[in-house]
Amino acid sequence: MDPNDVLKLENQLCFPLYAASRQLIKRYRPHLEALDLTYTQYITMMVLWEEGRVSVKALGQRLYLDSGTLTPLLKQLERKGYLRRFRSREDERVLLAELTEAGQALRERALPIPAQVGSCLPLEPEEASELYRLLYRLLRMEPEQNDT
Amino acid sequence: MDPNDVLKLENQLCFPLYAASRQLIKRYRPHLEALDLTYTQYITMMVLWEEGRVSVKALGQRLYLDSGTLTPLLKQLERKGYLRRFRSREDERVLLAELTEAGQALRERALPIPAQVGSCLPLEPEEASELYRLLYRLLRMEPEQNDT
DNA sequence: TCAAATTCAATTGCTTGCAATCAAATTATA
DNA sequence: TATAATTTGATTGCAAGCAATTGAATTTGA
């Protein structure tokens, strides 16, 4: 590559990743609005639909989000009545989030969403799974170094 | 796929896209801090380094961002002295952003960044270019429909 | 020619996203 | 057992990101 082109937008992996992520999330919005969820709230609910109950720490590890993002988001979901927040008996530092009945019921209404969004993607199925594989490979990046 | 697994985090393309995008942007931060730029400011500067001068509208189309995001961002870059903002003579509605000397000079300091970030990715070169290709295919999604 | 429609940027208001910091609880170790 | 280090979640402050709205400039077309 011409060294003058190194800084062109189109020559960097990060930009299409960032742009595609936002564009795809935008595709979820109209479907999620009916459920009164944002995309981040939706993926949080997905973990709860799978686990039923989860600590903030575990949630953060699963979603690659920190407590600064999760705390207000979980409070919001609690206000909406989809989950309860309470401290663990065994370790009072640990805060657990647990599905309510309403949160559990919401799952049924979310079931058709993946197919609805997936069907309008301009990718062949094998391209989608290759993309999927490469993204998970990329996610295996080492976590940031801290100077201990 | 078991229909019960449709809502699992790991079965959706959007989640790894969203997570990988944020993780990769995090990789840029330490390098960009030295230039007093955030990631979004950086990609804005990349367009300016390429074009020299660009309207808010064109910038938004290029970056998939709207004026609500770009207006404060461009004002910030103007405060830092990297660009000037002024209205077009031909059409007073159009606001143009133009590189200053300082903005032009900043390019030299940004040149090594792509290689620095790229070198720590856990992808083979051919995987990276395949990922790149698939992301641009995905970005060819139709823009959102508006009900005219 | 002039009123309506369109285009464009700015503004408002809300939700992330995250670094930095703080406080509380627990664990390790002297 | 003191006390130091670690873990954990909350809080704070700032920068996106974007929908909705506004207001000014321009274009369209009757």
Image: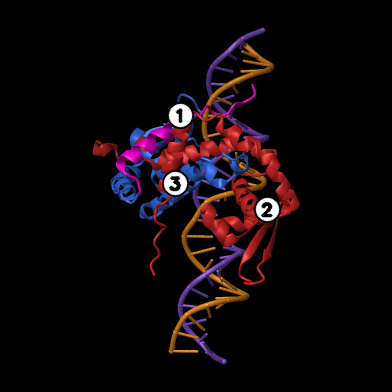
Chain colours: A red, B blue, C orange, D purple
User: Is residue B131 within the magenta segment?
Assistant: yes
Quadrant (top left/top right/bottom left/bottom right) for the N terminus of chain A: top left
Query: Does residue B87 appear to the left or right of B45 in the view shown?
Result: right
* Disc assigned to residue B88: 1
The mark closer to the camera, 1 or 3, is: 3
Where residue B46 appears, x then y in whole percent?
A: 37, 40
Q: Is residue A81 in sight in this rendering?
A: yes
> Contact, CB < 8 Å: mark 1 with mark 3?
no
Could you say whether the residue bearing mark 3 is in a helix, strand or loop? helix
Where residue B145 appears, x then y in whole percent?
A: 59, 26
Quadrant (top left/top right/bottom left/bottom right) for the C terminus of chain A: bottom left
Instruction: Looking at the picture, tell me which residue is in the foreground, B101 or A100.
Output: A100
Say whether mark 3 and mark 1 are on the same chain. Answer: no
Mark 3: give few (<14), some (14-19) or many (20+) Cα within 10 Å. Answer: some
- Which range of residues does the magenta coloring cover? B122-148
Instruction: Looking at the picture, tell me which residue is in the foreground, A22 or A46.
Output: A46
Pointer 3 chain: A
Instruction: Looking at the picture, tell me which residue is in the foreground, A54 or B25.
Output: A54
Tell which residue pokes out farthest to the front in this image.
B2
Q: Earlier in the sequence, mark 2 or mark 3?
A: 2
* Disc assigned to residue A14: none
The amino acid type of the residue labelled 1 equals Ser
Name the residue beneath numbered marker 3: A136
Q: Name the residue rendered at 49%, 48% in the picture.
A: B19
Name the residue beneath numbered marker 2: A76
Query: Does residue A140 appear to the left or right of A87 in the view shown?
Result: left
Where residue D1 appears, x then y in whole percent?
A: 57, 92
The mark closer to the camera, 2 or 3, is: 3
Could you say whether the residue bearing mark 2 is in a helix, strand or loop? helix
